[in-house]
Image: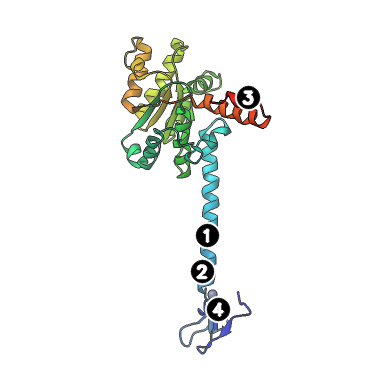
Amino acid sequence: MAETSDYRGNDGVLHCGICHEAKEAFYPAGMEWLGKKKHPRMCACYREECEQEEKRVRHKEHELFVERLRANCFSASHMYRWCFRNDNGRNPKMKIAKEYVDAWEENEKGNRGLLFWGGVGTGKSFMAGCIANELLEIEVSVRMTNFAEILNELNRSDTDRNAYIQKLCKFRLLIIDDLGMERGTDYGMEQVYNVIDARYRSGKPLIVTTNLSLQEMKNETNMARKRIYDRILTMCIPVQIQGTNMRQEEQREKFRGFSKSIGLFQKQDS
Ligand SMILES: [Zn+2]
């Protein structure tokens, strides 16, 4: 702990050559310990060093925790990159996703979810993924999945269905991506309803994305579907996502870059 710049002060104890604080202190008058009248003490530099080390440890722990949450949230690693940082800024509705995260505490308390509805490729999943990644960063447990995955899991012979549904309800936020009932069997619909209803009863928020229109959901006449949509509409505030088909646009951009790189088709760009 002693450095070459340290010096003995007029008070008879060692001082730090950098911050000049005492690095030793006397025991109370007349007392000693193991034949010594002084004991070491931390100077400001040393305290600072300890603080930094604690911060590093805490940060590392936080990162490991978030990494675990992320692995439990997504089923594919490309979704790790769906975050506000990587947004191209072209979707004005992204503001709503940000506001949802900012007001997370109240949203969680009030069991308020969102329903992103609109055409294919408008970035609904990306938006939901941004919310997930942002909340994971503040150590909120999130699960983003879809009914194809859920039904696969429920149909496995070794799955305890109730335990699986309860597990989905433990996440502080559940995101069901790409809800679409068009090919649902009666049995599948029953399972979908069970999951949505269990989530409803858990009192925790749900975010759903779907290519169905709000009108389609509201005017559904098939009872099995209707009760699913009704539940979702009581839990989620509908937000219409419009705009260009981002996927097609991305592909066009990729193609544009490619064609430029080989010096072809430049005149086709508009
Ligand atoms: Zn010091």
* Disc 4 + disc 3, Cβ < 8 Å: no
Q: CA distance from mark 3 to mark 1?
A: 57 Å
Q: Specify the quadrant of the image occupied by residue 165.
A: top left
Task: Name the residue: 57% across, 81% down.
Answer: 34
Q: Amino acid at mark 4?
A: Cys
* Disc 3 + disc 1, Cβ < 8 Å: no
Instruction: Of the two numbered discs 3 and 1 on the same chain, state the one appearing first in sequence.
Output: 1
Q: Residue under circle 1?
A: 54
Q: CA distance from mark 1 to mark 4?
A: 22 Å
Query: Helix, strand or loop at disc 4?
Result: loop
Label 4 CB less than 8 angstroms from ligand 1: yes
Q: Position of residue 47 (x, y in %)?
A: 51, 69
Instruction: Of the two numbered discs 4 and 3 on the same chain, state the one appearing first in sequence.
Output: 4
Q: Position of residue 37 (x, y in %)?
A: 53, 84
The front one of 248 and 199 is 248
Query: Helix, strand or loop at disc 1?
Result: helix
Q: Residue under circle 4?
A: 16
Task: Name the residue: 54% across, 81% down.
Answer: 15
Task: Name the residue: 53% across, 80% down.
Answer: 24
Q: Amino acid at mark 1?
A: Glu
Task: Name the residue: 33% across, 33% down.
Answer: 112
The front one of 80 and 108 is 80
The front one of 234 and 186 is 234
Q: Position of residue 17 (x, y in %)?
A: 57, 79
Q: Amino acid at mark 3?
A: Phe
Q: Residue under circle 3?
A: 265
Instruction: Of the two numbered discs 3 and 2 on the same chain, state the one appearing first in sequence.
Output: 2
Q: CA distance from mark 4 to mark 3?
A: 70 Å
Q: Residue under circle 2?
A: 47
